[in-house]
Image (cartoon, rainbow, N blue to C red):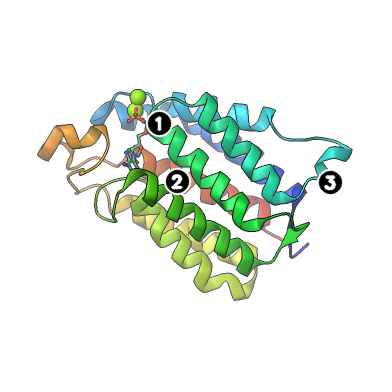
């Protein structure tokens, strides 16, 4: 359907968990270059816990999509170590809160929820665009989703995934100003930020489950 319902929210978390699991080694390798080499491990554990927290069967269809995202975010906060767990967990909780208890959401409402997720990450991590973090991928992705939301969630999510990829690429030459990579100074330049790379996966997952 054109609207984002409980089955779509659950499918997003499941697909994100699959893509994170498939790329966990790559994320960990990226983090080994400029951090402590645990990003793939952290996210894999977190998203596996989020999948475990999904309601199933009849309960799924009685649960508003916002509640599903809140439960997933809570599971990620409680099970994920490192900086990324609280950041992504907060993002999903804020997105879920923005969707409220409605049984489904329009593409425009989903755009609002993604903007709330970004605000949550910015409040918690205090990173700006250009600090070489997930914010560098998330900010253009949220803007692209919003700009394309009139064409439906599928088109908006595809535009967002492309913008996230470009945003992630833009972190390569940067020196980090937040997180562990900031301890490296100039030596962080020339490396892709692992959190920006994982943000790309979350938007690809959204594009996969909202495609017609
Ligand atoms: P840790 O660095 O604690 O081991 P992870 O390896 O799981 O945590 O995640 C690292 C990623 O988290 C970084 O690549 C970066 O994108 C993101 N990150 C770190 N600190 C911040 C912050 N203050 N704001 C936004 N994102 C951040
Ligand atoms: Mg790490
Ligand atoms: Mg760590």
Q: Determine if the C-beta at disc 1 is less than 8 A from ligand 1.
A: no
Residue located at (55% from left, 37% from top): 19
Is 60 left, or right, of 8 in this rendering?
Answer: right
x, y percentage for residue 31?
32, 30
Separation of marks 1 and 3 at Cα, in angstroms: 35 Å
- Which tag, 1 or 2, sits closer to the chain's start? 1
Q: Determine if the C-beta at disc 2 is less than 8 A from ligand 1.
A: yes
Separation of marks 1 and 2 at Cα, in angstroms: 13 Å
x, y percentage for residue 207?
59, 55
The vertical placement of 26 against 141, above or below, is above
- Mark 3, residue position: 61
Mark 1, Cα crowd under 10 Å, few <14 / some 14-19 / many 20+, is some
**Quarter of the figure with residue 110:** bottom right
Number of numbered discs overlaid on the protein picture: 3
- Which tag, 3 or 2, sits closer to the chain's start? 3
Helix, strand or loop for disc 3: helix
Is 106 left, or right, of 17 in this rendering?
Answer: right
- Mark 2, residue position: 199
The vertical placement of 195 against 32, above or below, is below
Q: Give the residue furthest to the bottom.
A: 150
- Which tag, 1 or 3, sits closer to the chain's start? 1
Residue located at (45% from left, 50% from top): 120
Do labels 3 and 2 touch, CB within 8 Å? no
């Amino acid at each position: 359907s054109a609207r984002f319902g409980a089955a779509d929210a659950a499918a997003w978390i499941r697909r994100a968990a699959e893509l994170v699991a498939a790329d966990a080694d790559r994320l960990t390798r990226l983090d080994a270059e400029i951090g402590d080499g645990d990003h793939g491990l952290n996210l894999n554990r977190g998203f596996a816990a989020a999948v475990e927290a999904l309601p199933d069967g009849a309960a799924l269809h009685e649960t508003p999509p916002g509640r599903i995202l809140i439960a997933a975010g809570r599971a990620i906060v409680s099970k994920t170590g490192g900086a990324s767990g609280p950041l992504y967990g907060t993002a999903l909780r804020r997105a879920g809160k923005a969707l409220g208890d409605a049984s489904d959401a329009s593409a425009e409402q989903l755009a609002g929820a993604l903007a709330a997720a970004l605000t949550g990450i910015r409040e918690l991590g205090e990173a700006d665009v250009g600090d070489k973090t997930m914010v560098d991928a998330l900010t253009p992705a949220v803007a692209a989703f919003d700009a394309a939301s009139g064409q439906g969630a599928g088109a908006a999510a595809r535009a967002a995934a492309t913008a996230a990829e470009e945003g992630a690429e833009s972190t390569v030459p940067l020196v980090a100003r937040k997180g562990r990579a900031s301890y490296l100074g100039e030596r962080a330049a020339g490396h892709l930020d692992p959190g920006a790379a994982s943000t790309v996966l979350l938007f690809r997952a959204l594009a996969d489950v909202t495609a017609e």
